[in-house]
Every structure is written in C-alpha cells, then in structure tokens.
Amino acid sequence: AYYTGVVFEAFDRKGVLRAIAGGGRYDKLLETFGGDPTPAAGFGFGDAVIVELLKDRDLLPSFESAGIDTVVFAMGEDMYPAAVNVANILRSAGQNVDLVLENKKTKWVFKHADRLGAKYCAIIGSEEFAKGEVAIKDLELGEQKTLLQTELSKWASTALEHATPSQ
C-alpha cells in the first residue's frame, strides 16, 4: 500500500453511492517511482459520482435555457484567435455567446448548440476567414449564410431584434 498515514473517504449521507472523494498521506509514493523521498498528501474526487449525487438530489443544473444566442466554433487551433475576436464582436453587440475552443467535430458543435438552445452557430474556417468572412448557420431554419466580418456587429444586433421570446 502506498498510504503512510491518515486515509479518508467521503460518501453521500445515505451511503448509496461509492466514495465521492478520498485521499491521504503518501510519504513513500514518489520514492516508489524513483523520486526523492518527499512527504506528500493527496486528494481526489470522482466527477461521475458527483453528477449522480446531483441528479439524485435534483441539483444538477439544466442547460436547456442557458440563454445562448450564438455558439462560436473555430475549425482549427489556428483559428482560435479569430474565434475569440468574433465572440467579442457578438458580445459587444449584446449577444450571449458560447465559445468552443476545442478540437471537436462540427456535428458535435451543432448538437452542443442545440442542447444550449442557441439559435445560431458562427463557424470560423481558415478559407472563409482569409477572405474576411464568417459562416453563420441559423439552427432553427437550417440555413447557412456567409457574412463579411465587418457586418457581424450589425447582424448580431438585428438577430437579437428578431429572436423568439423563448430565448
């Protein structure tokens, strides 16, 4: 055993779930892997157990009405700065924006936007951006159009004016 002192685990009060968190003293752990003798303590928790606990208590937040107008998605890491810029323009125009700066497939982003209840998705691709353009997909109508970056602020304000009351 790699524990050398106090060990603890935390459980839900009903004792229904496995340990939510745990930890202890590990003074010899680094030595075991070739490191110098170092007194240490550690702690960890299980996110899956926390989610189950929150679900059981009806405390898990719902993102169905997150109030997101547009999800902004960069098609590659090289487009992250451009996506941040687009998100800032949309936010300055009054939109609530969710910015995705992860290596995700477009299909995932559209599902994510749907889960958030977003009306639009701004897709930042390198070819379009090199031409000064951004693709905007209307998720309710399924239509996609290309806007000049210089038109984004005006579009964002107009989109808010025409937003449905459910947003």
Image (tube, grey):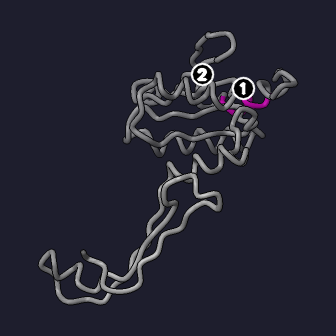
Q: Mark 2 points at which residue?
A: 136
Q: Does the magenta stretch include residue 112?
A: no
Work out whether mark 1 precedes mark 2 in sequence or the reverse, and give the earlier one: 2
Q: Does the magenta stretch include residue 156?
A: yes
Position of the C terminus by quadrant:
top right
Of 111 and 27, nearer the camera is 27
Identified by mark 2, the residue type is: Ile
Of 51 and 19, nearer the camera is 19
Q: Where is residue 25 in the image (x, y as percent from the top left)?
A: 36, 83
Q: Residue furthest right?
A: 165
Q: Mark 1 points at which residue?
A: 155
Please state if 106 lies on the left or on the right of 1 as rendered.
Answer: right
Position of the N terminus by quadrant:
bottom left
Pointer 1 local density, CA inside 10 Å: few below 14, some 14–19, many at least 20: some
Q: Where is residue 148 in the image (x, y as percent from the top left)?
A: 59, 25
Q: Where is residue 109 in the image (x, y as percent from the top left)?
A: 51, 28
* Image: magenta residue range: 152-157
Q: Is mark 1 on a helix, strand or loop?
A: helix
Of 1 and 114, nearer the camera is 1
Q: Residue furthest left?
A: 34
Q: Would you say the residues marked 1 and 2 are in contact, meaning their CB atoms lie under 8 Å apart?
A: yes
Task: Say which residue appears at 58% left-offset and 48% top-offset.
Answer: 51
Q: What element carries label 2?
A: strand
Give the main secondary structure of the magenta stretch: helix
Residue 63, located in which quarter of the rendered image? Answer: top right
